[in-house]
Image (spheres, rainbow, N blue to C red):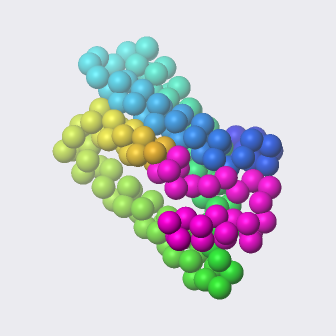
Amino acid sequence: MTVVALRLLDKRGRREMLFIGVAGMSLSLFMLGVAFIGETGTITTVIAVGSLMLFVSSFAISLGPIFWLLNAEIYPLSVRSRAASLGTMTNWFFNFAVSLTFLPLIDLAGQTGTFWLYGAVGLVTLWFCWRFVPETKGRSLEQIESIFQRRAEK
């Protein structure tokens, strides 16, 4: 799916791929939570495996590659290296935080509650992308910088 994303990013745009991918991730997490309700059997196993496949595919066409692309595009040249370093550090910190808190969340909220919580975070991510992430496809670094300058002046 990452290869698919590489072809689609310049055709469809970063925002559209973010919306599609994050929506797919959220949907798959809600479905995975459903798979843990009640008795386990063939149907729930199929739902769990299918939702995991959807999650990985959705991540691979959206947040996986697009974070790294946007992290290199959106900062002004004067702070690009420091800001990209901070963005990278923040990304890895939250990856670590999810890994560190996953099992305690399972103990606290159960499997269904944990995956539904992560699905809800995905919905917040959709809102954030809609509200704050500009389309950068086909724009120069200077044009992208001017988008953020206009937003900062408001």
Q: Position of residue 21 (x, y in %)?
A: 58, 40
Q: Residue at x 46, y 36 (%)?
A: 26
In this rendering, is residue 36 above or below 8? Answer: above
In this rendering, is residue 88 above or below 57? Answer: below
Dominant secondary structure of the residues highlighted in magenta in the image: helix
Q: Position of residue 3 (x, y in %)?
A: 76, 45
Q: Is residue 26 magenta?
A: no
User: Which residues are drawn in magenta?
Assistant: 128-154
Q: Nearer the viewer, residue 35 or 116?
A: 116
Quadrant location of the N terminus?
top right
Q: Is residue 3 visible?
A: no
Is residue 111 found left or right of 75 in the rendered image?
Answer: left
Name the quadrant containing residue 65: bottom right
Q: Nearer the viewer, residue 119 or 95?
A: 119
Furthest residue toward bottom: 78
In this rendering, is residue 146 above or below 80? Answer: above
Q: Is residue 78 visible?
A: yes
Q: Position of residue 40 (x, y in %)?
A: 33, 19
Q: Nearer the viewer, residue 101 or 82?
A: 82
Q: Residue at x 60, y 45 (%)?
A: 18
Q: Is residue 141 magenta?
A: yes
Q: Position of residue 2 (x, y in %)?
A: 71, 46
Is residue 119 found left or right of 71 in the rendered image?
Answer: left
Q: Nearer the viewer, residue 114 or 103?
A: 114
Circle count: 0
Q: Residue at x 60, y 71 (%)?
A: 149
Q: Residue at x 43, y 67 (%)?
A: 93
Furthest residue toward front: 154
Name the quadrant containing residue 37: top left
